[in-house]
Image: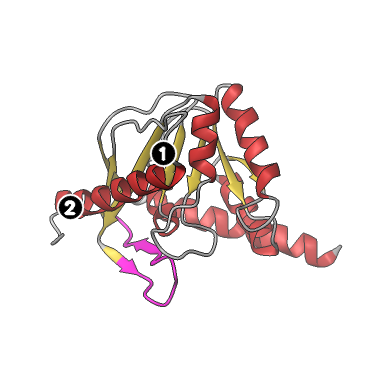
Amino acid sequence: MRPVFLSGLLGRLLGVLARLWVGTLRFDWQGPTIPSGSVIVFHHGDQLALIGARPRGRLVVAVSSSRDGALQTRVLGVFGLEIVRGSSSRNGVRALKGLGRAILDGASVLIAVDGPRGPYGQVKPGALFLARRLSVPIFALAASARGHRLGRAWDRFLLPLPFSRVVVVCGEPIRVGSTEPMAEAIVRVEHALADLSKAAAIARGASA
């Protein structure tokens, strides 16, 4: 029991520190307002930069069933996010069912579409299957900020500098047609995220 207790304590501590860090950031949202009951997608490495600019309302996120996921669950809980355990590499069907129930109950769901292990920018199909099955829109998000991209991390994790401005760009809703080949839909979402990443960098004043 002690390792579980210590893991929970560490997770909460990291969550409090992350919340204090995010609390120093200034967020500039650009794009449409996301309605409840949507699928919200983003690159795994943008998650810290995005968490402070997330839409209002009930939000549910899938977190890996691994030990690292248990720690992440505690961290995200500090931000008021609801958790469904499972990922594309473990218990993925269970996670999608949980996210689907959340959407039917009026929540929006957050999905890092190239997670949990990459490669960077390569969209997994789970979010698209979910949106198509429930006939709900996909909204893609990207962020840019003064800070550091952790080059050795596969996801190029963005760590914004304290008190910096974070530009968050939201794309127009993406619909996945019932007869559209999944491969084509995946390419559309990958291109949308790449374009939004460039737009966020330009909006922040960085070179694209």
Q: Which mark is residue 54?
A: 1
Quickly name the residue at label 2. Answer: 204
Q: Is 153 a magenta residue?
A: yes
Q: Residue at x 38, y 59 (%)?
A: 121
Residue type, mark 2 in image: Arg
Q: Is 82 a magenta residue?
A: no
In this picture, is 118 found above or below 63? below
| SS under mark 1 | loop
- Residue 58 can be seen, yes or no: yes
Classed neighbour count for the residue bearing mark 2: other residues with Cα under 10 Å, few (<14), some (14–19), many (≥20): some
Q: CA distance from mark 1 to mark 2?
A: 18 Å
Q: Nearer the viewer, residue 199 or 92?
A: 92
Q: Quadrant of the C terminus?
A: bottom left
Q: Residue at x 13, y 55 (%)?
A: 205
- Where does residue 206 sit, x and y in percent of width and height? 15, 60
Q: Residue at x 27, y 54 (%)?
A: 144
| SS under mark 2 | helix
